[in-house]
Amino acid sequence: MIVHSAENSLIAALPGSERLGTDLAERLGGRRQLVEMRRFPDGESYVRINGQLRDTPLVIVGPLDRPDEKLLPLLLLAATARELGATEVGLVAPYLAYLRQDRRFRPGEAVSAVHFARLLSDRFDWVVTIEPHLHRLRNLGDIYQVPARAVSAGRLIAAWIRANVQRPVIIGPDEESRQWVEPVAAAADAPFIVVRKCRVGDFHVEVSLPDLAAFRDRTPVVLDDIISTGGTVEQIVRMLVGAGFPAPASIAVHGIFAGDAYERIVNAGAKVIVTCNTIPHVSNAIDVTAHLAAAARAMLERTAEGWNERASPSAIAVEQ
Ligand code: R5P
């Protein structure tokens, strides 16, 4: 028995994600649910759901970059939806934050990945995201107590590379990146290398390029999951240009671009900077909405026993 139909769902967008909310509603066949979210002058959050929710599943959509300012209003919204009769509350967070502090690197540190996941698991029935930063964690199920689904942007990125870069060589910025650089390179029919990186501070990384002699006639494509301060990509782009390569392309799934990160990467010599539309930014050129919608549908239409056949994980894999 199917628990819900996606067509009955309501989709509420966090501020700034209205376009994604509308696109998602169209793809699910559901309706947009208007919500009002703002700050009182004293800094507290005001949240209002403008309409009827009774007996309806609600999907809240929005990336969780700058998470500290978004989390409390998000939790208030989810809790209010439940009070007002939503049958379930799901979260589509194209960018899921707090995944990098996944262990105690120094004594006394908060393992914030675990605590953040617990906060969301307490308020949501399920979570969907794309390319979460999983390095030491095997999957989201390691820390989320509700069904949590991560879809891949790999094939979309490979398609962009095939269409836009002649004779690419894909550059992974660190050993962690091998897990997504390798399949993207295979799908783009391109060679890849992985750079050695050592982070020495929030803003500083030390990078050493391997021997690139075999790739002299290729255009470098620096591929990372997240651009945050931009320090990693900026430095690699600068070194590649300094080594005489053509201006590299920089591709990331999630473009946070803290401070002047975007300008610094441009100034380092990148020919183009491209991101997926997980966080609204001028660099968004790869549309992941269809993948998010397919995963959200799978969650909404899961059976009491688990995934239904139409919306199984393998159905999504085929769509990619
Ligand atoms: C590493 O853990 C990630 O894959 C990225 O390389 C990192 O988040 C990039 O950070 P930033 O832009 O601050 O150098």
Image (tube, rainbow, N blue to C red):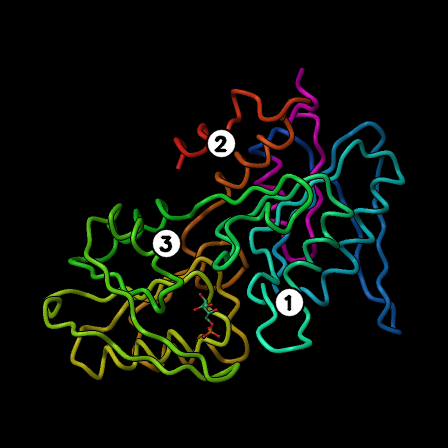
- Residue projecting furthest to the front: 107
Tag nearer the camera, 1 or 3: 3
Nearer to me, 10 or 206: 206
Sequence-first disc among 1 and 3: 1
**Residue bearing the label numbered 1:** 66
| Crowding near the residue tagged with mark 2, few <14, some 14–19, many ≥20 C-alpha atoms within 10 Å | some
Quadrant containing the C terminus is top left
Residue 289 to residue 318: above or below: below
Name which residue type carries label 1.
Arg
Nearer to me, 133 or 269: 133
> Secondary structure under badge 1?
loop
Residue at left offset 50%, top offset 76%? 229
Sequence-first disc among 1 and 2: 1
Residue at left offset 89%, top offset 74%? 42
Asked whether, in this view, residue 285 is left or right of residue 148, the answer is left
Name which residue type carries label 2.
Pro
Residue 191 in picture, x, y percent from top left: 19, 57
Asked whether disc 1 touches disc 2, contact meaning CB atoms under 8 Å apart, the reply is no
Quadrant containing the N terminus is top right
**Residue bearing the label numbered 2:** 313
Q: Which residues are magenta?
A: 1-25
Residue 145 in picture, x, y percent from top left: 69, 44
Tell me if the residue at label 3 has its CB under 8 Å from ligand 1. no
Asked whether, in this view, residue 105 is left or right of residue 77, the answer is left
Residue 38 to residue 318: above or below: below
